[in-house]
């Protein structure tokens, strides 16, 4: 499992990074299951934000995908604050991961929290989840100092 500060090789697929090839989905698998299987075979550096969001929402490949997602969110935050577009789906996918996930990546959680705190004008559903995430991370930080 990579450390949050270690760069992820963008040319590798989740299958390669995890060292685990999933069997083909069953004949009656849902489109979501089929999509997740297919996305795990693609190089992580080629995944679009919506594809990252789909995998992250399913808790697939989090040790590799969360650092990529946080970097995208961090890098696009200044344009959002200036009135540009921001990917609510990716933000929602990331901030709605369980606190236990973020406890494994405290530096990454703090980086995301700092990014989230710069955002303005988020839709209500994302704003509520982002606020809950920030509160949970603040609670985690309080535990670190004890």
Image (tube, rainbow, N blue to C red):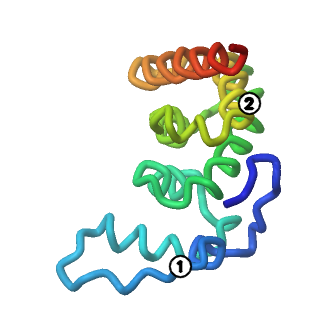
Q: Quadrant of the N terminus?
A: bottom right
Q: Secondary structure at mark 1?
A: loop
Q: Relative to 45, say whether 117 is above or below.
A: above
Viewer-proximal residue, 16 or 86? 16
Q: Residue at x 52, y 23 (%)?
A: 133
Does residue 114 appear in this view? yes
Residue 118 position by quadrant: top right
Quickly name the residue at label 2. 111
* Disc 1/disc 2 C-alpha distance (Å): 29 Å
Residue situated in front as seen by the camera: 36 or 146: 146
Q: Is 120 situated left or right of 34 in this image?
A: right
Quarter of the image where one finds residue 121 = top right
Q: Residues within 10 Å of mark 2 (few under 14, many from 20)?
A: some
Which one is earlier in the sequence, the residue at label 1 or at label 2?
A: 1
- In the depicted view, which residue is nearer to us: 92 or 103? 103
Any part of residue 83 in sight: no
The residue singled out by tag 1 in the image is 20
Q: Position of residue 24 (x, y in %)?
A: 36, 86
Q: Is residue 11 left or right of residue 64?
A: right
- Label 1 neighbourhood size at 10 Å, few (<14), some (14-19), many (20+)? few
């Amino acid at each position: 499992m990579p450390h949050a500060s270690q760069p992820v090789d963008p040319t590798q697929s989740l299958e390669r990074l995890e060292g685990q090839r999933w069997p083909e989905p069953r004949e009656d698998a849902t489109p979501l299951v089929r999509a997740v299987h297919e996305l795990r075979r693609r190089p992580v550096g080629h995944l679009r934000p919506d594809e990252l969001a789909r995998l992250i929402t399913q808790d697939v490949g989090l040790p590799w995908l969360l650092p990529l997602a946080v970097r995208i969110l961090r890098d696009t935050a200044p344009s959002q604050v200036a009135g540009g577009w921001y990917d609510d789906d990716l933000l929602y996918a990331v901030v709605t991961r369980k606190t236990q996930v973020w406890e494994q990546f405290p530096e990454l959680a703090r980086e995301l929290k700092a990014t989230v705190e710069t955002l303005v004008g988020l839709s209500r559903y994302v704003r509520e989840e982002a606020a809950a995430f920030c509160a949970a991370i603040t609670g985690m930080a309080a535990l670190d100092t004890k």
